[in-house]
Image: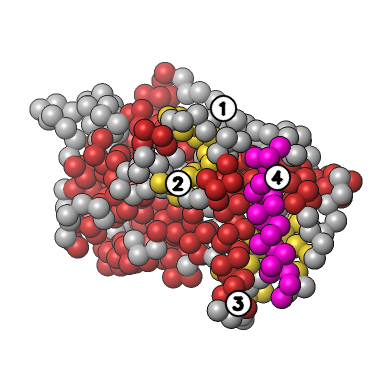
Amino acid sequence: MNETDILLVTAREILGRMVTLSKSVTIYPHKHPAVMEPAAGICEQLSAALSSFPRVTFNIVKSDIYIEKYLLRDESLRYSEFIQSLVRRGVSTFAFERGITPEMIAVLFSVIYGKESAALDLELLKKRAVERGVTAVSFGKLVAFDLGNDTYTLEEGTISSTTARASYGTALKCMDTLQQDVMANKPINMVALRQTVTSLIEDFLSDREAVLGIMSIKNYDEYLFHHSVNVAITALSIASKLPLDADMMRMVGTCGLLHDMGMIKIPRDIMNKPGRLTEVEWGVMRRHPIEGAQILMRYEDLGELPVLAALEHHAGYDLSGYPTLKGKNRPHAIARIIGVADVFEAVTANRAYRRAHSIHQAVSVLIQNAGGLLDPLLVKLLLNTFGVFPPGSVVRLQNGETAVVVEPNEDNPFSPKVRALSENSGNQTDNQLIDTSKDPARYAVVGLADSRPV
């Protein structure tokens, strides 16, 4: 292998241990073996790389992590929770230099993830690290990043694929135009709508990373547009696991884009109310499925499925939702797909009355409602994408050990692949990726660990 290949392999090893370390320091003091062991592993890998390079730099650009100018694509997806936890703390670049020690690395992560970190701004975190002897590593906010002919800034977005990002932007513009046409009682541009859905299918279903990337695109001022596009993409990711032909896949995407059209009839002060809705206001809000169906019925070229999706996506798998459906045992299948996608996307979005929940919290909502409001099969299909325990979750294993989730297991979303954190795990297990499905008597995940959430 050449130096670049060695650097990339080293970076992947370092990132895996960084995820472990970020969890360990929330549970143990920085000199505890469960902290020092991954810190020593990171230091060993860095020292090897620093023998060939004067410094080793990790940069976070959008939702991706790079070592120097090289994108770590798989790790950007696998460790997305860890990456976002750094960004929330204002940290988007690390530069490690010769002279780095395990103690410095342990202290660095203790400062960034310690109990006091939430109350300190980035400059105070940096000052605290220096005061505690961290001298061979610098960290902070990445202002700009040169890569080839492009310069990226953190404010540009979170979807890494250029084509997917362009497709997403086109979908937003399509929704804006479509809404204006509907409000003006003009015909819908069916060609543009079909092209938009086709682009979403082509650009997102082939890029699982891009599907995960939409979770952090939440523009409050254009919430309805972003929500509709995100629901369409999430619904398509569910539908892609079903035996549907191309025409039906396009219909799923169309239904996702149009499912909340009735919201244009809801007064903005009710939609954006920061507090709990009154009974009267909630009654108005609950009319949006009916309003949407009535709007879409005006456009015969759409067919009946978008009408059904708009009307029934809140009705509930067990019909306990709204509006009341008479003479049916279940909502239409396409409405059930949209319903699952809608709940997942809504829970992870910033709203006027609450902050966005994490993917793990959204997964918990899905599981709690599976078989009730939500179709359990469709919930399972979505969980196969995100996992019951998303990467970065700290879990408790059957044998009493604590572990951090590294990646989901698509064959069994309840059995992720993890790295042990417990002091009883020993060095060998700490460095191994454990597939919890292989030995459930020992490694089955029994729940989340009691630790401060990232």
Q: Which of 100 and 295 is in front in this view?
A: 100
> For the view shown, which residue lies furthest in the right direction?
131
Q: In x, y percent, where is residue 169?
A: 46, 63
Magenta span contains residue 413: no
Q: Residue at x 40, y 42 (%)?
A: 436
CB-based contact (under 8 Å), mark 3 and mark 2: no
First to last magenta residue range: 32-52
Q: Which of 267 and 53 is in front in this view?
A: 53
Q: In this figure, which residue is indicated by the disc labeled 1?
A: 450
> For the view shown, which residue lies furthest in the left direction?
327
**Residue 249, relative to residue 235: is it above or below?**
below
Kindly tell me whether residue 10 is visible in this rendering: yes
Image side of residue 119 versus residue 279, left or right: right
Q: In this figure, which residue is indicated by the disc labeled 4?
A: 36
Magenta span contains residue 37: yes
Question: Of the residues under marks 3 and 2, which one precedes in the sequence?
Answer: 3
Q: Which of 358 and 287 is in front in this view?
A: 358
Question: Residue type at mark 4?
Answer: Met
Question: Residue type at mark 3?
Answer: Thr
Image side of residue 353 versus residue 52, left or right: left
The quadrant in which residue 398 appears is top left
Q: In this figure, which residue is indicated by the disc labeled 3?
A: 4
**Residue 134, relative to residue 425: is it above or below?**
below
Q: In this figure, which residue is indicated by the disc labeled 2?
A: 434
C-alpha span from label 2 to label 4: 20 Å
CB-based contact (under 8 Å), mark 3 and mark 4: no
C-alpha span from label 2 to label 1: 21 Å
State which quarter of the image contains the C terminus: top right
